[in-house]
Image: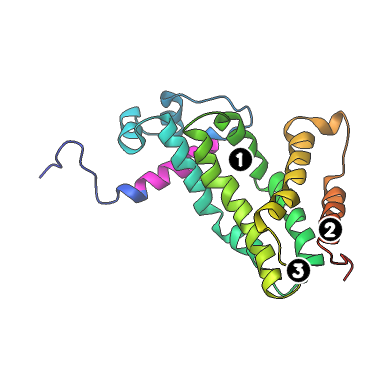
Amino acid sequence: MPRPPGSRNRDYAATRHALAARLAPRLLRPDGEPAGLTDLAAAADVSTTTLKHYFADRDGIYSAAMQAVLADSQVHLHAMRDPGGRPPAESVPALLLGTVAAWRRYGLGRVFAAGLALGLEHTGRGPAFLAGVLEPFLQAVEDLLAAHVRQGELPDLDRRATALSLVAPVLVALLHQDSLGGDGRRHLDVEAYARQHAGTILAGLGRDPGR
């Protein structure tokens, strides 16, 4: 018996997620050029009617793609939250150096650059990038700091403000050096900067970063 028009098949959610994961690389291309439904349908090897059934429109595809990125990042976010028995002087620089590595080797830079290019000042795509990428990343940093506070290794602190102070300069440095071509104009050793910045933040919190 055929389904009534507009009804959903039983594997709707799984198919939608699989399509979104397949489309994410096309949406997050380095050139940042918006893709139309026809282009996206070709990338996923489906019809535009299928895309409309699962996502309604291009913004719906973008939102689902950000959620697919979040789902695929859970293992890495969990690792970021866990100090792993290390003191702050080790875990905090490791977090920043891991961010640099993820940016350059595992596609985080492409996700950020395209997410900002497509999402800034957009009422739908901006919040989707925030919910799928930026906020989970910041929350993982906050959770790492909270773990050290619970263990008595850091003083009580404003976790959100400290997380922003910790990662924002490194993200700007990566955008400058990698995404905007600043490496060829005014080189910065981002790894060395990340280590120095971690020590500065820890020292500002009243802890000797060498301990």
N-term-proximal mark, 1 vs 2: 1
Apparent side of residue 197 relative to residue 60 in the rendered image (left or right): right
The residues tagged by marks 3 and 2 sit, at their Cα atoms, a distance apart of: 11 Å
Q: Residue at x 10, y 45 (%)?
A: 1
The residue type indicated by label 3 comes to Leu
Mark linked to residue 154:
3
Q: Are marks 1 and 3 in contact (CB under 8 Å)?
A: no
Question: Label 3's element?
Answer: loop
Which residues are the magenta region?
15-26
In this rendered view, identify the residue nearer to me: 2 or 178: 178
For disc 1, the marked residue is 111
Q: Amino acid at mark 1?
A: Val
Residue at (41% x, 35% y) in the render: 60
* Front-most of residues 122 and 113: 122
Q: Tell me which numbered mark, 1 or 3, is placed earlier along the sequence.
A: 1
Q: Are marks 3 and 2 in contact (CB under 8 Å)?
A: no
